[in-house]
Amino acid sequence: MTVPPPPPAPSRRVLVVDDDPTVTEVVAGYLDRAGFVVDRAADGPEALARARQAPPDLVVLDLMLPGLDGLEVCRRLRESGPVPVVMLTARGDEEDRVLGLEVGADDYVTKPFSPRELVLRVASVLRRAAAVRQGPAAGPLLHGGGITLDPVARSVRDARGPLSLTLREFDLLAHFLRHPGRAFGRAELMSAVWGWDFGDLSTVTVHVRRLRHKVEADPARPRLIVTVWGVGYRFDGIPDGAADGTPAGAPRGAREEED
């Protein structure tokens, strides 16, 4: 008796939102050839309507949209449930990237961009999101610097209470907690946390800055995630009652400059 082959895995649906029809056409074409089912929208209200009609597995979202900008669209999408978002921005202004990450974007790509790289980033974000949904088979609690992170529950807290981290911020912090005292270059972090061997290294810089704002008592004088000049970053898990007598989370004198 011949055993029938298993059914093919369902194609994942990507919603591309951009008011530039040329960008939409190119991005949709590359995603389609990569095996994704692609929906399109030219503005914010249309994007929200299409997401309600056919919930996407991921949204490629332009920041600058008529009527309802990408930040507001991202907020409203996240109110309806978790959906990975890759933000597109035509500006090089870092503040735009930070705002996108703050409202829940999982990644961003600055125009002009390589469509092939965007497809790889979409696939990477989807893999990471699938791993989060499945959860690790096992994982002890991670501790350091007054922080407790639960890899299974995807929760993190410090003395102030629970911390709200984006998907990438959580994975970055978990990586640091697993390797306290070790200095990592930005390329190493991009490979280990993002799974990329290419791309804009400022992505790492922005995420480190955002993470500092959430875990440091004084982000301008970081004591946990410190800059190692000429290398990158290191997590120093300073316990309560550190050797210098300074309470954990309190700023020390020397200022650690960010990249």
Image (tube, rainbow, N blue to C red):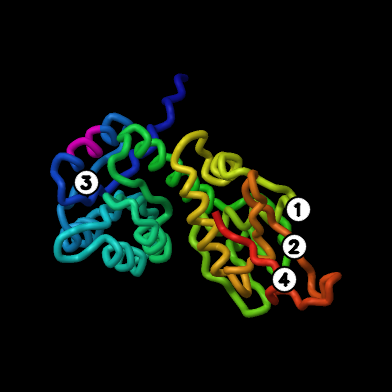
Which of labels 3 and 2 is toward the front? Answer: 2
State the mark number for residue 181. Answer: 1
Amino acid on which disc 1 is placed: Gly
- How far apart marks 2 and 1 lie (CA) works out to 8 Å
Helix, strand or loop at disc 2?
A: loop
Residue at 25% across, 38% down:
27
Work out whether residue 237 can be spotted.
Answer: yes
Magenta extent? 25-29
Residue 146: image tag = 4
Q: What residue type is labelled 2?
A: Gly
Q: What kind of element bears circle 1?
A: loop
Q: Is 236 part of what is drawn in magenta?
A: no
Would residue 133 be seen by someone viewing this image from the given angle?
A: no
Is 18 displayed left or right of 117 in the figure? left
Circles 1 and 3: CB atoms closer than 8 Å: no
Residue type, label 4: Gly
Q: Quick check: marks 2 and 1 in contact, CB under 8 Å?
A: yes
N-term mark: 4 or 2: 4
Task: Identify which residue is drawn at 83% across, 76% down.
Answer: 245
Q: Nearer the viewer, mark 1 or mark 3?
A: 1
Mark 4 and mark 1: span between their CA atoms? 15 Å
Residue at 75% across, 53% down:
181
Is residue 27 one of those drawn in magenta? Answer: yes
Q: Mark 3 points at which residue?
A: 39
Mark 4 or 1: in front is: 1
| Image quarter of residue 145 | bottom right
